[in-house]
């Protein structure tokens, strides 16, 4: 039987790469997103739903539909997140902090909350939360994002302990600097904040890894597909970086 997979924020970037990766294995894939245009452009065979991951009634309704249409869920990729402000902690306003933490942390919490009963009923499943190397090392000028990404690791560890007796695994993937529009925005904002060029900041991030490289969304997706597969049947409670090996999270240029 083909896997049943949900990817939050799955219409672009890492989420879309995950959705395509699972679909390529024959899985039935649903994605959520807040971008109606991106959802309309999804590849044939991937089902898109316009849902904000911090809207609890909408999330609850989504999982009712998943149960009705798919009969359960085998893999959750709790991937929704936003970069948040790029500024020193004393320059971040509380509203921006709360928005960033809400999407990154509360979005993962709500997805896990409504996934757990479905997976418990079948005594199997895999929950994969997208964290970040910022959730392992911290990053200057990214306080709310880093705090939220550390927090989802704590959430994942707890899920692994609570759900393991039901045959459900939970893991977190920590992407490093990922090529794409979101990271490009971070580079531009950080360059402005530090009085540097975009290319100087890019080089700084890349040189902070032992492999001297950014990663791609497909690199992250490949790990998610593995973690959702039977090949990873006893991999749970783990924090797995896909980052080219970060050796200096704040390289000086």
Image (tube, rainbow, N blue to C red):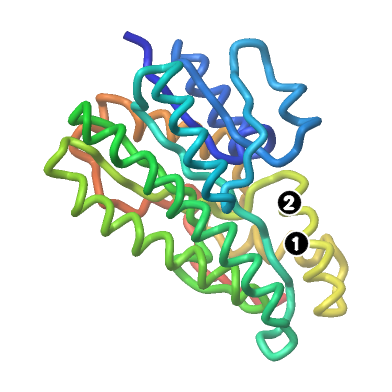
Q: Residues within 10 Å of mark 1 (few under 14, many from 20)?
A: many
- Label 1 residue SS: helix
**In which quarter of the view is residue 121 placed?**
top left
Residue 148 is labelled as: none
Quadrant for the N terminus, please.
top left
Mark 2 — residue? 182
Q: Looking at the picture, how far across and down is residue 198, in whole percent?
A: 84, 63
Q: CA distance from mark 1 to mark 2?
A: 7 Å
Mark 1 — residue? 186
- Label 2 residue SS: helix
In front of the other: 131 or 7: 7
- Left or right relative to 228: residue 169: left
The reply to whether the C-beta atoms of the residues labelled 1 and 2 are less than 8 Å apart is yes
Q: Looking at the picture, how far across and down is residue 234, in whole percent?
A: 18, 37
Q: Residue at x 63, y 29 (%)?
A: 49
Q: Residues within 10 Å of mark 2 (few under 14, many from 20)?
A: few
Q: Looking at the picture, how far across and down is residue 125, in whole percent?
A: 28, 32
Establish if 177 lies above or below 196.
above
């Amino acid at each position: 039987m083909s896997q049943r997979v949900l990817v939050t924020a799955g219409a672009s970037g890492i989420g879309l790469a995950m959705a395509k990766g699972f679909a390529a294995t024959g899985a039935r894939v649903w994605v959520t997103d807040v971008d109606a245009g991106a959802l309309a452009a999804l590849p044939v065979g991937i089902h898109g739903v316009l849902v904000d991951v911090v809207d609890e009634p909408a999330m609850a309704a989504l999982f009712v539909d998943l149960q009705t249409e798919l009969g359960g869920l085998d893999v959750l990729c709790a991937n929704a997140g936003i970069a948040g402000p790029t500024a020193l902690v004393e320059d971040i306003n509380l509203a921006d902090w709360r928005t960033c933490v809400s999407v990154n942390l509360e979005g993962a919490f709500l997805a896990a909350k409504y996934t757990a009963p479905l997976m418990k009923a079948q005594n199997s499943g895999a929950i994969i939360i997208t964290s970040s190397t910022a959730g392992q090392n911290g990053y200057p000028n990214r306080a709310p994002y880093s705090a939220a990404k550390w927090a989802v690791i704590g959430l994942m560890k707890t899920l692994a302990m609570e759900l393991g007796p039901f045959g459900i695994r939970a893991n977190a993937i920590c992407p490093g600097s990922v090529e794409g529009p979101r990271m490009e925005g971070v580079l531009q904002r950080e360059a402005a904040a530090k009085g540097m060029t975009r290319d100087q900041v890019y080089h700084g991030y890349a040189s902070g890894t032992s492999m001297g490289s950014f990663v791609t969304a497909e690199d992250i997706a490949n790990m998610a597909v593995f973690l959702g597969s039977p090949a990873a049947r006893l991999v749970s409670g783990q924090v797995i970086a896909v980052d080219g090996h970060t050796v200096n999270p704040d390289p000086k240029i």
